[in-house]
Amino acid sequence: MFTGLIREIAVVKRYENNILSIQSSHRAKLGDSIAVNGVCLTVIKVHSDGFDLELSDETRSIIDKSKLTGKVHIEPAMQMNDRFEGHIVQGHVDCIGTVLQIISRQNATDYIVRVDSKYIPYIVPKGSITIDGISLTVNDVYQESFRLTIIPHTLRETLIGRYKIGTKVNIETDLFARYIDHILLYRNALKKNHSKSISWNDIDKIQMSY
């Protein structure tokens, strides 16, 4: 599990044969989980100046290859004794978004990001969302897009300040919105097919599937 608070801007050394090699000051250990631009990956090799991670078929089918080059956000997985900040992030990317508009404000910048409309129900006004691994607050939600307001500190400390119209971003929607939607769909299916209410055992099975 992650928090969506970026710990370092690292650099991709290479990406070959589904192996991502990262140059980083973070001292990773074999088997560690590390989010790279919001994607939870496992460390398979450690170097003096970084580490290697492997991308599965599922991961490669979802993310955009532009997220595997140049500078990247990284966040090691939380430990039990860590302070909890940001919001609950799994590192499971739901979809790719596209920066549609960038609007400068007095002391912040608005970013309008377009997504497939089927993901809009999981994006909640004033709720949390993860963009390239960054925990952010959603301000407004539209039919096929949403608005973020980014403060100067975040622009300085992350790569968002480099984004342009057309930039692709990894998006992880709100965990609880996905849970609720899945539970309701499952309950409705049970009622339709078996005419019975969902039980706590059913809910436990749904939760275990995440």
Image (cartoon, rainbow, N blue to C red):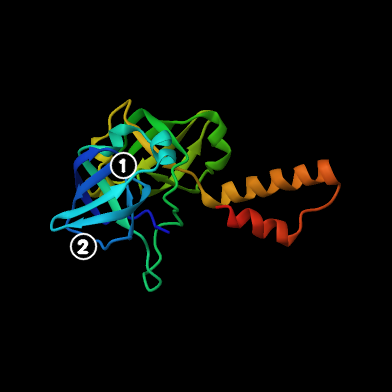
Farthest residue, direction front: 17
Asked if residue 8 lies left or right of residue 78, the reply is left
Please report the residue visible at 72 percent of the width from the left and 61 percent of the height from the top. Answer: 200
Q: Tell me which numbered mark, 1 or 2, is placed earlier along the sequence.
A: 2
User: Residue 103 placed where, x, y %?
Assistant: 33, 31
User: Residue 49 placed where, x, y %?
Assistant: 13, 55
Crowding at dot 1, Cα within 10 Å, few <14 / some 14-19 / many 20+, comes out as: some
Name which quarter of the figure residue 167 lies in.
top left
Farthest residue, direction right: 195
Crowding at dot 2, Cα within 10 Å, few <14 / some 14-19 / many 20+, comes out as: few
For the residues marked 1 and 2, what is the alpha-carbon distance in whole angstroms? 34 Å
User: Residue 118 placed where, x, y %?
Assistant: 56, 32
Asked if residue 98 lies left or right of residue 187, the reply is left
Q: Which mark is residue 27?
A: 2
Please report the residue visible at 76 percent of the width from the left and 58 percent of the height from the top. Answer: 199
Question: Can you tell which of label 1 and label 2 is closer to the viewer?
Answer: 2
Q: Amino acid at mark 1?
A: Ala
Badge 2 marks a residue whose secondary structure is loop
Residue under circle 1? Answer: 108
Please report the residue visible at 31 percent of the width from the left and 26 percent of the height from the top. Answer: 165
Q: Amino acid at mark 2?
A: Arg
Farthest residue, direction left: 48
- Front-most of 120 and 56? 56
- Front-most of 177 and 185? 185
User: Residue 204 placed where, x, y %?
Assistant: 65, 60
Res 6 seen here: no
